[in-house]
Image (cartoon, grey):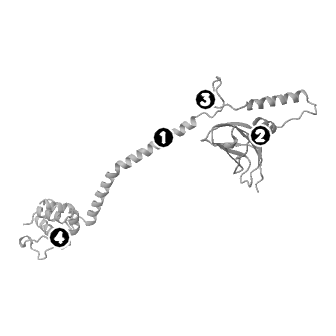
Amino acid sequence: MITGSILKEKREALNLLPYDIAQITCLSTNQVKALEADDISLFYSAKIRQQCLNRVALALGITIPASEAGDEEAPTPPAESLLNINRPPDLSVMSYMHQELFAIERKFRPIMINALLATSVLLFANFLAGQEETAKPTSLIPPTDGKIPPTVALPKAPIAANHALGTLQLAKDIATNPIADDVRQETSATLTEKACADFANLLEVQVELPIKPANKVYFTSAIPQNICVSDASGTLQHFNASTKVGHVFHGMAPFIVSAEHLELLALFFQGKKVNLNGFQKTAVKLTEHPIL
């Protein structure tokens, strides 16, 4: 008599899974396991169970005794006779695939969760860093209590004060001598040049083959230093340049740029980089070049 333990031992000896036997015999995996456990609850009758048992035994190469062969002459009943007791093979395959997919998902679930958490933390940290950057004050005016932070370097000369005093003195001279011929009214551009640069150390530059309008100056500094920029309209601005931030000054050409260490500036005008290497100057005057 063929029992479930015989089927299981033979299957394991052939290194096969219940799923493999189910595919060969057109049975479900649960029915194969029920046959190996001598369980008849998954079959409509003992006769149908015996037919399924014979089919599995033949698939495993087990000889069926004549007393258990049943009334059918053919050793293997046709698959059509078991259509009413089997699940469709494609459903069995899909169930197996679902089980495999769920196993893979359970295996990689911790990795996916950790990756999402790490990404969320990085995005939140980047957001906080952006908030801190925008919260920093942009004013370059030193504190009024007379104490200067160690990281803030004062200009070598009170440039803005000299500019204001020169403008007031010029206005006073014109008011006191309205009809004097020798009084020359200086333009705002001339006053700006005096305020931002020393004429003895002024380098005049005109870029070649410009590609952009002469309406701004862009620069970065290799070291922290104080930089003064002015334009033809008399607008003057001081920058406390650092090595991490680029600065843009919009205005009208010509521009005058003065710095403590001019050779350490990366200066761009009309879309071209201005060559400052080898010039022992403290200021540069950028003159507009027509775009061809």
Mark sitting on residue 125: 1
The residue that disc 2 covers is 201
Q: CA distance from mark 1 to mark 3?
A: 29 Å
Sequence order check, earlier mark of 1 and 2: 1
- Amino acid type shown at disc 2: Asn
The residue that disc 3 covers is 150
- Amino acid type shown at disc 3: Pro
The residue that disc 4 covers is 59
Q: CA distance from mark 2 to mark 4?
A: 101 Å
The secondary structure type at the circle numbered 4 is helix
Q: CA distance from mark 1 to mark 4?
A: 63 Å
Tell me the crowding category of disc 2: few under 14, some 14 to 19, or many 20 or more residues within 10 angstroms, Cα based: some
Q: Quadrant of residue 147?
A: top right
Sequence order check, earlier mark of 1 and 4: 4
The outermost residue toward the bottom is: 73
Sequence order check, earlier mark of 2 and 4: 4
Q: Nearer the viewer, mark 1 or mark 4?
A: 1
Question: Residue at 47% of width from left, 41% of height from top?
Answer: 124
The secondary structure type at the circle numbered 2 is helix
Give residue 252's position: percent from left, percent from top. 76, 44
Q: Look at the numbered discs 2 and 4 and tell me whether their residues touch, using CB distance below 8 Å.
A: no
Give residue 76's position: percent from left, percent from top. 15, 73
Q: CA distance from mark 1 to mark 2?
A: 47 Å
- Amino acid type shown at disc 4: Ala
Give residue 224's position: percent from left, percent from top. 63, 37
Q: CA distance from mark 3 to mark 2?
A: 29 Å
